[in-house]
Image (tube, rainbow, N blue to C red):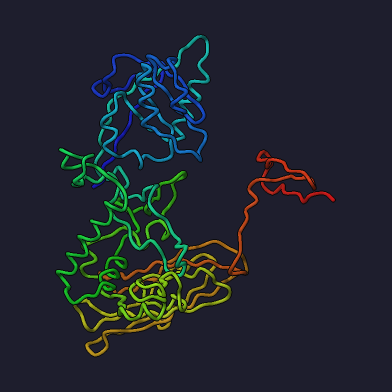
Amino acid sequence: MSTDMLYIVYLGERQHEDADLVTASHHDILTSILGSCDADKIDSSVKGKIAFCFITAFNVVPSYGRIINAVSSKGGRGVIWALYTTDSFLTEDLLTLDIPFVPVDYEISYRIFQYIRNSENGDIPKAKISLTRTMIGSENSAPKVAAFSSRGPSAIYPGVLKPDIAAPGVAILAASPNTPEFKGVPYRFDSGTSMACPHVSGIVAVLKSLHPEWSPAALKSAIMTTATTFDNNRMPIQANGRVPKIADPFDYGAGFVNPIMAADPGLIYDINPSDYLKFFNCMGGLGSQDNCTTAKESVIELNLPSIAIPNLRTSQTAVRTVTNVGDHQDVVYKAFLEPPAGVEMAVEPSELVFNKDKKAQSFKVTFKATRKVQGDYTFGSLAWHDGGSHWVRIPIAARIVIEEIYSRISYSACVRRAVGEEKEPNFEQPVGCFQPPRH
């Protein structure tokens, strides 16, 4: 089930066909606040009006609470806010505002901006704000990766694909901490890893009760290899941000957690705790001589339920081992490949045969760059299927490179600088107009 809030704004004198949805008895005048919407610069000109905050300084995150309070203190009737995503607004703070607050995306915002700017013949731009409607069901796509969610790749361990998994973490109703700030407030809405982690922890506890013999690595494997990359409408999961896009493993890892499927994963990628010592130069992370941020060997050989190759020059091979934990001892799994763009993949063997005497099987995955380029990451997957209900899927990230250590510069804007002169970059020039200085 998915739930979303539909914000309703009516421009001009247009009336909605359902009068019960419109609670305001009149249209308020719209006034634009362009630029950064500085709360300190909001004056009495907003009195009796709806302030339309059209932010153009994208590199600065304004304090929407201060701006809304400033509009309210100056007699404003409401705020319409232009932004890319509402993820950061889904908190209980909105329940304490004195005036209506309506976040809208930039497409709608530009239409509002055009409506205000093009008002002619003495017409005064007006708008009516109605109460929100709650929409529940498949009409709303869910889940989505929140704009504030941590992204990969890992700077410390680029050979380990991160994140691992995605879980519910936006506007979660949870118990309040026992602090003076929340005195008398037993529950509150919150967002972030602090909300997603308890979901996964609870799933791990259930899996451990079902399979007490499973190691921590086996539990992690079961969660990752059964995760879904599709939403409730069987469409690819979207990742929110400045520009929403189809999510990839650097957004959600293996995908969105699916506890029912995780209870019966079919195969697991297990790891003995001592295996970590082969790759990481630490013993529990304690002691002055221990350094867990230094890898001894290439971590591509660690039996993780994922594969990351940050520096693929020509070809590279990864070895993985899977253990059959399904109900059927005699079973055959076949490999299904989705190679990253620009990369050829091969799996040997392409079939894994399990029986009562052979519960674990190893295989090699070979990656070959199809071009010589200093590229960016592309993504794929490897799935093992038993012909029944088990799809054991792991995510793959690969980056083709010419040099392992480099700084990739994109000439999306041009800098024209004469010898001996220091000038500001000229961002009005088209892409590709870079010219070397004259001698």
- How many numbered dots are placed on residues in this image? 0
Q: Is residue 397 above or below residue 238?
A: below
Q: Residue at x 51, y 77 (%)?
A: 316
| 270 displayed left or right of 120 | left
Q: Is residue 101 above or below residue 386?
A: above
Query: In the displayed image of the protein, which residue is found farthest to the right?
Result: 439
- The image position of residue 293, as x and y in percent, is 43, 69
Query: In the displayed image of the protein, which residue is found farthest to the top?
Result: 122
Q: Is residue 150 above or below residue 382?
A: above
Q: Quadrant of residue 282?
A: bottom left
Q: Which residue is drawn at 26% across and 37% down?
A: 92
- The image position of residue 46, as x and y in percent, is 42, 17
- The image position of residue 415, as x and y in percent, is 70, 45
Residue 165 in sight here: yes
Query: In the displayed image of the protein, which residue is found farthest to the bottom?
Result: 357
Choose between 372 and 58: the one closer to the eye: 58
- The image position of residue 368, as x and y in percent, is 54, 75
Choose between 336 and 426: the one closer to the eye: 426
| 33 displayed left or right of 336 | right
Residue 347 in sight here: no
Choose between 44 and 89: the one closer to the eye: 44
| 428 displayed left or right of 204 | right
Q: Quadrant of residue 7?
A: top left
